[in-house]
Image: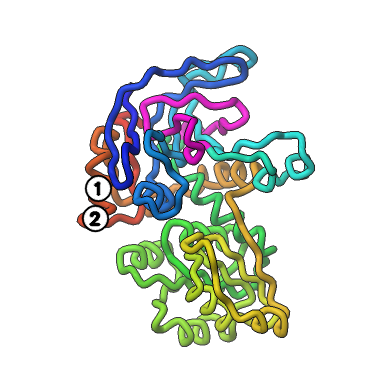
């Protein structure tokens, strides 16, 4: 099969590798679409140390069940599916409490270097990672479930309720997903800060108020009536954390979901003296992922807005190069098979 491999920092290439047959409680999936995540781009660029030469990446994906191993119901062959890429031990306290994302032995398909993931024609995964999709839903929508689940989990971590006033800093795919999650949760007062015009246009097409960092303070005052009770930092830099603190009420919940910087500098008194709560959010629980898949099936009007570039896997090296050097700009790119 063809796979898209990181051969060196900044360089992707097509290679041929054998299809791994499914063993006990595994499923072989014929991939229809896989999304390019911002972490993939940063990893290929060598900026975050989370991607390795020789690795086949790809964790936002969907396709059809092709074959199953022992212990898997053969009736699912041919069914459209997406993949929950978070793999955990299943036995620790976190897993037993429904928080697999906190498992000390967790790993992510598409991030782990020794596991061939979804920038490929086929992928073999544990059956527990497989989430069935409605037959009537375009299967490529399934490749959007993963980033949508990240945004939804961030809002869940903030214990968001309909009375909240929400500020989202960063209007890329994860910030957009957080805004969409606000709608799911009944929140009406939402402002999204995004400087990039292309991504800002998607925010507006989704029906949310969009501002820019230069106008952030005024936009919060005008559209939220007061400072935010919940802030989602979908960037993760010292500058965006400072903006979150200055535009949030006392007692506000601030969720860090973006990971632009490994280290942050902040003014501690803005947290302690104002009793703000700083919350980390990583991936999602399995329940967050599955509920997002169920929600997506009923909201095609939202799903269709998010993707603005579809390319075949064979053009993957060109697409990555163009995104990295800035000659191509897109909100969300899917590498798609001709089917689905």
- Residue 192: percent from left, percent from top: 47, 71
Q: Quadrant of residue 185?
A: bottom right
Seen as rendered, the residue at the extreme top is 70
User: Dot 2, how many residues are within 10 Å of its Cα: few (below 14), some (14-19), or many (20+)?
Assistant: few
- Residue 237: percent from left, percent from top: 49, 69
User: Is residue 242 rendered magenta in the image?
Assistant: no
Residue depicted at 45% across the width and 41% down the height: 60
SS for callout 1:
helix
Residue depicted at 40% across the width and 55% down the height: 47
In this rendering, position of residue 9 left or right of residue 101:
left
Quarter of the image with the N terminus in it: top left
Q: Are marks 1 and 2 in contact (CB under 8 Å)?
A: yes
Q: Please name the residue that numbered disc 2 is placed on.
A: 325
User: Dot 1, how many residues are within 10 Å of its Cα: few (below 14), some (14-19), or many (20+)?
Assistant: some
Residue 201 numbered mark, or none? none
User: Is residue 110 rendered magenta in the image?
Assistant: yes
Q: Quadrant of residue 137?
A: top left
- Residue 49: percent from left, percent from top: 45, 49
In this rendering, position of residue 80 left or right of residue 316:
right
Residue depicted at 52% across the width and 86% down the height: 221
Q: Which residues are magenta?
A: 109-136
Along the line of sight, which residue is nearer the eye, 262 or 184?
262
SS for callout 2:
helix
How far is mark 1 from mark 2, CA to CA?
Answer: 6 Å
By secondary structure, the bulk of the magenta-drawn segment is best described as loop
Residue 321 numbered mark, or none? 1
Identify whether 86 is placed above or below 322: above
């Amino acid at each position: 099969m063809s796979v898209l491999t990181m051969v060196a920092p900044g360089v992707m290439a097509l290679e041929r590798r054998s299809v791994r047959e499914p063993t006990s409680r595994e499923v072989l999936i014929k991939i229809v679409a896989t999304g390019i995540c911002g972490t993939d781009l940063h990893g290929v660029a060598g900026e975050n140390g989370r991607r390795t030469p020789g690795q086949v990446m790809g964790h936002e994906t969907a396709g059809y069940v092709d074959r199953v191993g022992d212990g898997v119901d053969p009736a699912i062959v041919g069914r459209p599916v997406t993949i929950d890429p978070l793999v955990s031990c299943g036995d620790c306290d976190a897993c037993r409490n429904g928080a697999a994302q906190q498992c000390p032995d967790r790993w992510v398909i598409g991030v782990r270097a020794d596991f061939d993931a979804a920038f490929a024609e086929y992928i073999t995964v544990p059956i527990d990672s497989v989430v069935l999709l409605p037959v009537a839903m375009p299967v490529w929508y399934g490749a959007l479930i993963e980033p949508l689940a990240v945004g939804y989990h961030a809002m869940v971590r903030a214990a968001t309720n309909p009375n909240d006033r929400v500020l989202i800093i960063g209007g890329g795919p994860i910030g957009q997903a957080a805004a969409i999650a606000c709608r799911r949760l009944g929140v009406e007062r939402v402002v999204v800060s995004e400087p990039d015009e292309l991504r800002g246009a998607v925010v507006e097409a989704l029906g949310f108020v969009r501002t820019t960092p230069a106008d952030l303070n005024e936009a919060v005052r005008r559209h939220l009536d007061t400072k935010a009770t919940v802030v989602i930092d979908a960037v993760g830099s010292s500058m965006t954390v400072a903006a979150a603190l200055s535009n949030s009420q006392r007692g506000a919940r601030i969720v860090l979901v973006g990971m632009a910087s490994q280290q942050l500098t902040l003014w501690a008194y803005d947290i302690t003296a104002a009793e703000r709560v700083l919350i980390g959010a990583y991936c999602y629980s399995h329940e967050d992922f599955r509920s997002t898949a169920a929600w997506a099936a009923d909201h095609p009007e939202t799903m269709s807005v998010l993707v603005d570039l579809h390319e075949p896997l064979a053009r993957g090296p060109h697409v990555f190069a163009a995104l990295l050097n800035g000659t191509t700009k897109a909100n969300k790119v899917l590498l798609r098979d001709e089917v689905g």
